[in-house]
Amino acid sequence: MKKIFFLSTISAVILMTSCNKQLNQVPISTPTTATFYKTPSDFLQASNAIYGDLHNYPVRLANLSEIRSDNIYGVSVTVRDWDPVNDFSPSLAANAYVTEAWGTDFNGIFRANTLLEQIAKNGSNIGSATLAARLQAEAKFLRAFYYFDLVRYFGQLPIIDHVVSGQEANTIGRSPVADVYKLIIADLQSAVANLPTVYSAGDVGRATKYAAEALLAQVYMARSGPDYGIKGPGLGANEWNLALPLLQDIINSNQFTFNSSYSNIFSYNNQNPAVNKEAVFDVMYTSGISGTSDLYGASFPWTLAPSGYFLSIGGKTSNGSLEIIPVSNDLANSYETGDVRKDFSLYTAGYTNAGSTENRPFFKKWLDVTKTPVASRFDWGINFIAIRYTDILMLKAECILHGATGSQSDVDAIVNQVRTRAGLAPVSGVTLPQLFSERRREFANEGSRWFDLQRSGDLINVMNSWIAKEDAQKSIKPVVANYVIYPVPQSQLDTTPGLYSQNPGY
């Protein structure tokens, strides 16, 4: 099951050496690559390597979505990489988080292109047309996943849909967002048509038809968001009616279940996607493999939790972020009395370490201190649910509120199902702002907030109103439309000067 994320020697063999810093590639038309794809196992290893670039995805969501949003007020004593993200600094082009996002996602794209090319050239070596079609569909799903991640952060992108040499890569400029979406949609439509609905035990965790449908629905919804007058992910496409049938097909499949216990969704004892029916698509991790925790274990549980907390309970110095990255008062105070999600998601009790008391809340949704890894803070043994069934339901409600087929009672029923699980009273006449407010609490620390704000059309107003209330230190700059997306990494601009232009405002 979890072996699908093992990054074996194929990571070196396919030679996608962007090094998370530049688009430039080592030419892959080498004897090593050409002679590798001889057995079904070779192709499976190549597929596993594409999944491997999901490893840092949840950490990226924390750094570039949660910290960017009104969920975090991340003022630190010593300037850390998260400060300029939270402060809306115009000087983010060299930021480590921004550079990682571009480099890792394109590395996954390069790996997907390599496998797709090798299936086209040497697919007969797989020995099974069914397996070949599935691996091709998985590669297209993952290529679309990485491109969708990129387009929501950066807007216009170079379209690289085939294996290219380093020289060729240095001639490919950024394409309009609409063209990037054409590739994403075509890949996902192919994935929907060719991925299985379920897997046998050894392959559980790979992308299914329903994961592809969910991602395609999210793409249509992102495209339907406003453009803010910039070249970002929103196109004002009004494609809510295209997203809804995809979401409904997932619901009608009866493959997934709304978990009646909020905490059980994230339990370390409920990690098998075959059992945890909230998981439409997981990023999967394996802990306890000696000497390899950076590759296979998870680090996202502590990304937004401070090392001081772990020290206060007798934990390891290396667990937790260097300083507290506090949950905003605005988010903490938004929970209604009795909302079980607050106590589960936020640590509010305070702690004392080295004679210093810290009372600001922080996220603890993914923390179970009884599961703290012994060898390395990068070795937590919990999966990350990248697409959750509750999200499918709430996205359906959003589509209906935008005019897709359905009624107000359908919307209210979905929201009240979520609220009932949270221990709250039902409501009626739910509006879009109320739905986004409920999503904020439901998916806190799951990385959806910034993208929800993008799609809502109210990002600038929400963030500036929040800054006026929250920013006691007056460190956060006013949010303008250009800050809806991030800058192109400086390393990319430097690789081939003049090939890319920087996003406005940076």
Image (cartoon, rainbow, N blue to C red):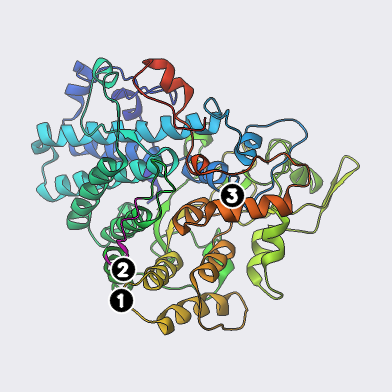
**Does the stretch in magenta take in 307?**
no
Residue at the farthest right position:
355
Numbered circle sitting on residue 205: none
Secondary element at tag 3: loop
The answer to whether the residue labelled 1 contacts the one labelled 2, judged by CB atoms less than 8 Å apart, is yes
| Amino acid under disc 2 | Leu
Instruction: Report the predominant secondary structure element of the magenta stretch.
Output: loop
Reading the image, the residue beneath label 3 is 69
Q: x, y percentage for residue 417?
A: 50, 79
Residue at 22% x, 58% y is 196
Which residues, given as a range, are shown in magenta? 235-241
Above or below 244: residue 356? above
Sequence order check: which comes first, mark 3 or mark 1?
3
The residue at which mark 2 appears reads as: 244
Q: Is residue 392 visible?
A: yes
Q: Disc 1 or disc 2, which is closer to the eye?
A: 1
Please tell me in which quadrant of the rendered image residue 63 appears: top right
Label 3 vs label 1: CA separation? 31 Å
Above or below for 414 versus 57: below
Image marks 3 and 1: residues in contact by CB distance under 8 Å: no
**Which dot marks residue 405?**
1
Q: Amino acid at mark 3?
A: Ser
